[in-house]
Image: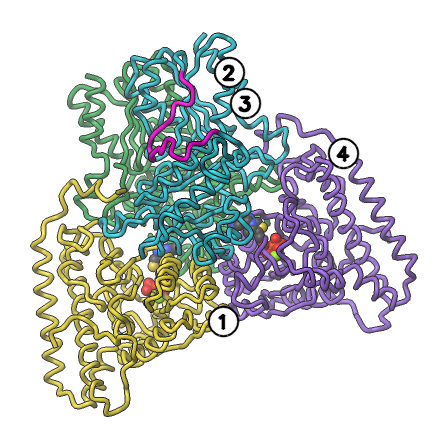
Chain colours: A green, B cyan, C yellow, D purple
Amino acid sequence: MSLASAELTYREAIRYALRDAMRADERVLLLGEDIGAAGGPFKVTDGLFAEFGGDRVMDTPIAETGFVGAAIGLALAGYRPVAELMFADFAAVAWDQIVNQAAKYRYLSAGQMPLPLVIRCGGGAGARFAAQHSQTTESWYLSVPGLKVVAPSNPQDAYALLRAAIDDPDPVVYIEHKLLYPAKGPFQPDGDRVGIGSARVARAGHDVTLVATLAMVPRALSAAEHLAADGVDAEVIDLRSLAPLDLPAVVESVRRTGRLVTIEEQSVSGGWGGNLVAEVVARAFDALDAPPERLGLPEAPMPFSPVLEDAALPSPERIAEVARRMVG
Amino acid sequence: MSLASAELTYREAIRYALRDAMRADERVLLLGEDIGAAGGPFKVTDGLFAEFGGDRVMDTPIAETGFVGAAIGLALAGYRPVAELMFADFAAVAWDQIVNQAAKYRYLSAGQMPLPLVIRCGGGAGARFAAQHSQTTESWYLSVPGLKVVAPSNPQDAYALLRAAIDDPDPVVYIEHKLLYPAKGPFQPDGDRVGIGSARVARAGHDVTLVATLAMVPRALSAAEHLAADGVDAEVIDLRSLAPLDLPAVVESVRRTGRLVTIEEQSVSGGWGGNLVAEVVARAFDALDAPPERLGLPEAPMPFSPVLEDAALPSPERIAEVARRMVG
Amino acid sequence: MTSRKPRSSAGRPAAERPGDPTLAGDLLAMYERMAQIREFEEQVHTLFLKDLVPGTTHLCQGQEAVAVGVAAALRRDDYTTYTYRGHGHVLARGMDMVAAFAEIMGRAAGVNRGKGGSMHLTDRRLGLMGSFAIVGAGLPVAVGLARAAQLDGGGRVSVTFFGDGAVNIGAFHEALNLAAVWKAPVVFVCENNLYGEFSRVDHTTPFEDLARRATAYAMPAEPVDGNDVLVVRRSARAAVERARAGGGPSFLECKTYRHRGHSRSDPGRYRPSEEVAAWMARDPLLIAQAKLVELGVPDAQLEAVRQAQRAAVARASDAALASPPPGPDELERDVVG
Amino acid sequence: MTSRKPRSSAGRPAAERPGDPTLAGDLLAMYERMAQIREFEEQVHTLFLKDLVPGTTHLCQGQEAVAVGVAAALRRDDYTTYTYRGHGHVLARGMDMVAAFAEIMGRAAGVNRGKGGSMHLTDRRLGLMGSFAIVGAGLPVAVGLARAAQLDGGGRVSVTFFGDGAVNIGAFHEALNLAAVWKAPVVFVCENNLYGEFSRVDHTTPFEDLARRATAYAMPAEPVDGNDVLVVRRSARAAVERARAGGGPSFLECKTYRHRGHSRSDPGRYRPSEEVAAWMARDPLLIAQAKLVELGVPDAQLEAVRQAQRAAVARASDAALASPPPGPDELERDVVG
Ligand SMILES: Cc1ncc(C[n+]2csc(CCOP(=O)(O)OP(=O)(O)O)c2C)c(N)n1
Ligand SMILES: Cc1ncc(C[n+]2csc(CCOP(=O)(O)OP(=O)(O)O)c2C)c(N)n1
Ligand SMILES: [Mg+2]
Ligand SMILES: [Mg+2]
């Protein structure tokens, strides 16, 4: 299909970003398990092997430390590797390469060795994959200076942020949400070429600011619909980037609404919500009409059983209820 | 030396906790690199090999995934292993075993398989070990349900928390601070046998609450001295446990002082300070006289050069200045 | 033939001479167990098509002889660890089928009350100590279990199952080296089914004969016909007895094949049809059947075994379907103690 | 003999027949370089005793022949990666001594402006691509550099140094397998100095001859006398030329010894004194000297080389000491671009 069309799935948007980046720059390479002829476990890279061949779409053994490390080497040598970790949880077996090596390379070399490296992974719950295949892993990356971290929620951002990540001179962790792969959304090939580090107002409103990422964004939007029915006008901000964080956008919104609810798909104890609340409190204390609230997962691994998994995730109803209580 | 003496170093306190736990329960075992005859890279386990032998103080190859995994197996089989990771940063090469396996074992098995496992490591900066050997790594563990995380700042707590960790039925990450190893402090063998999850008021005060962990605790106490000279009476809380967190203790303190400053040895963007601020704001909004502030490391890996490393760490002066401004 | 428990060799390998009076009985018991696993997996697939199995599944049809042959070499108190493709491993050691089905369907009657699902079936009473969905992660844990057994001194053994794809990950290496250094009583059972997901083994490893990997740890290793349950049992017995006797770890490369795709969404089309056909002809159930007929067991008896297993599986599946989902309190239970 | 650059073989191994007219010259150049490293390390130790070296250091006295012999087999544009025990590796490829000393002392004139220190000396202009303080972490990166060289097609090679202790960690395994599968032009140089920290190799690995590990990857491997710089160069050339010619990765196990303890705080007392004595007698500088004398180089010339290096090291150390610490703006510089 052509990029001129107006609707794409999230999966296609990622695929086309890879394709277009590879067409535009032959230093762009992909590495990962079964991403070649097989098209990737999530079928994101389907067709890319056929177009670009095995030297640019490289299947690897099951060796995440090995191929993330190799991607670092490729980046050092002038390539622009995009390593696919498949499930976000698998970053755990490559964690040293990500946080101790990639994130620190530029600094340790005093700027001699920037690392233009992208690490893609599919995170998140809802697919009944249980505790080892359901984490968004956002929290793992929140105090790792040297990494940029993005987390798109829709096709347009998925495309733009991946292009930006590949163009970026630094390691970028690009977290996808596996539930969103089939989700369709409007897409303009020459549309918003958002850079890393800018949040997006997904819905404007003036009573309360809901901040979310990934699959929590559609839930927040749905909560906003519920709220609208009750006469509460919610603003929804899609963070999109976790590092750097677009604090000004959030602070500006809360200054207008006076109320903040964060919604994240992880337990709040180590999430980005705490940082956001603390920053908003520090910068807009007087503008707050109520203490900000955070919604997240319970303090538990993700259970397999659908009833439990569904209960773990913040529902639009629960989000709306918290916001309503805050406004009311 | 005997435990009846009144002063111990932090290193000795850890050693005696291991020794006493091993004497009390022969299922307690130690694993790690060079912890045996060599006494450990930080000399913490000195003498234990001589007393307990190689079956209870096991040297391992350089294979953190291997021996942390083996510790899981030992725990499953009824032992109480204490795995020493040496530098806290090395948790990165065992990260999967820690967060995807150990933390989730009890849950995945619906309670069949609790894991009484302790992971010890020496974290923190100040020793001029550069970016890959200076992280406290506290932030990595903050959204990992199933793990308990403690971080003692003095001999008494080091002893008590390690005994508690070894007695605990769950995996406990026990973060030491390498700068504190030679630090002496009062010690009562039958003294405060603090449990996991309780904070400690290190200094009582009524103007502002300073919350810290590890090597930031002595700095906060030193800041409190500076402040006292200026007539500001600071309360200093040593969190000691990061998971579970003693929120009631912090909230109670801030209710009295109306002011909160958190001091942590990591960048605040993913630290525990954000969570603490958010919880305090949620629970004691009206008691706040000023927006809480967070101090931490700059958003950068830890540099080697002493001048830079010293500049990176929150100094007592800087802590005092922030608190003074807040009060004043 | 109603026992579900594999016979325990109690430390002494049974004779296997032709004419061995126990051979037909043993093989029939193993055949029964393999038939149970086959029927179980087919039923999981059926349930899945009916939308009764949430998430994903990794079935093991074609690999039954490995799980059953190894289990037949074990004592009741030995430890096993395995993977997301673990239905065969747990049934081979006697997991209750209702509890297994219920777990796979996320029900309260599940062996882990629905919290683990297909990839995480465990039962510590049966020595089923860990089911790992991260490739390779189980091997170090198995070494720790073995080290515990060694310290205990009771001759217990730890056996860990993993795939051909797992031999390339760091945890594999660290575990094998640690086991070698500790001379830990562990048997590493590699189920070389030629594919890790969609990649053939020779695409990800410089050779197909994975037993070669063990030389790097000075560890006894053997390629094994993983589709002949008697061969598997014989090799497993040797390795298990070596471990029990203090001889340290061993590596068994069981050559086998999965009949279906990697997981529920995979039709397995990347495999040449001749390869599939050749392996279907070497179906472990067919091989066992032929041997049983040779040993004088009538066809009708084999068919009866198969029918009985099919019926037992159907009953267990129905019973599991009757279980409600776990209660809401399960969500935050069992996180810490 | 003033050049600091190792001779480039430009892809063609030089002859090494006895009577080879270039041999004495080559060896003298390598001796000079080894002497430089030796003097450098001694000076680091002296500076450390004067409290001028913050943090820790891992010195390489006794292992100079490995770094120098391998460097002599490389082209200027080849890549190398190494470890916290890396002073020899960087000097062997020509790192400026002032920049190295200044880095080790945390000064602004340091090659990384004092941000990395002793464990992190890198200079991309010299192909010095990474110094890793996490054991084993450099190997996968080296494979990536080799894969890049392979894609580039220019015959460039990637060489990575690591210790005997590193052969037990997962990253080692993943890297060697990946290199084998990709046939990447990488040479794995294991410096087997018999100890990882305070543990003897046979305490942590089931054998001492680590070249055996390479069989698990079907990789050519060779045990090498790591204290004879000519032997190291010969083996390295063979491996490097194989890689350049598309023959894939190789593994060299260089048997050597560190004269000092693991790091600054370690007196190395866990080593039997006979073992130390035997290896001191096989000091790589002594071995090279003996060979040079045999080739007709007068003792006095060798002493002059040594003196010249001592003087050069002292000058560089002084120059580095004159450098101020990095400015405060360095703290938050170079985090991201
Ligand atoms: C560390 C890690 N990487 C990738 C995966 C995704 N994954 C699940 S199964 C699998 C293939 C494993 O193949 P093999 O070891 O041969 O076992 P088989 O599935 O054939 O039984 C992969 C890549 C994973 N679960 N863990
Ligand atoms: C993953 C990891 N574990 C442990 C350490 C601590 N450590 C630093 S050097 C070293 C010994 C390494 O020995 P070897 O590989 O033989 O190299 P050598 O020091 O002898 O040159 C250890 C254990 C580390 N840096 N990284
Ligand atoms: Mg397989
Ligand atoms: Mg060594």
The mark closer to the camera, 2 or 1, is 2
Q: Chain of mark 3?
A: B
How many angstroms separate mark 1 from mark 4 (CA)?
51 Å
Q: Is residue D100 above or below residue B261?
A: below
Q: Could you confirm whether marks 1 and 4 are on the same chain?
A: no
Indicate yes or no: mark 4 CB to ligand 2 under 8 Å: no
Q: Main secondary structure of the magenta part?
A: loop
Whether residues under marks 3 and 4 lie with C-beta atoms below 8 angstroms apart, the answer is no
Res. A115 in view? yes
Residue at screen point 67% across, 55% down: D78
Find disc 2 in the rendering and name its residue. B225
Q: Chain of mark 2?
A: B
Is B200 within the magenta?
A: yes
Give how far across and how far down residue B38 sits, in percent. Answer: 56, 52
Q: Tell me where residue D198 sits by quadrant.
A: bottom right
Where residue D86 is drawn, which disc sits there?
A: none
Highlighted magenta segment, given as a residue range: B186-204
The mark closer to the camera, 2 or 3, is 2
Q: Chain of mark 4?
A: D
SS at circle 2: helix
Find disc 1 in the rendering and name its residue. C218
Residue at screen point 36% across, 70% down: C192
Find disc 4 in the rendering and name its residue. D321
Mark 1 crowd level (few <14, some 14–19, many ≥20, 10 Å Cα): some
How many angstroms separate mark 4 from mark 2 (CA)?
37 Å
Find disc 3 in the rendering and name its residue. B315
Mark 2 crowd level (few <14, some 14–19, many ≥20, 10 Å Cα): some
Q: Chain of mark 1?
A: C
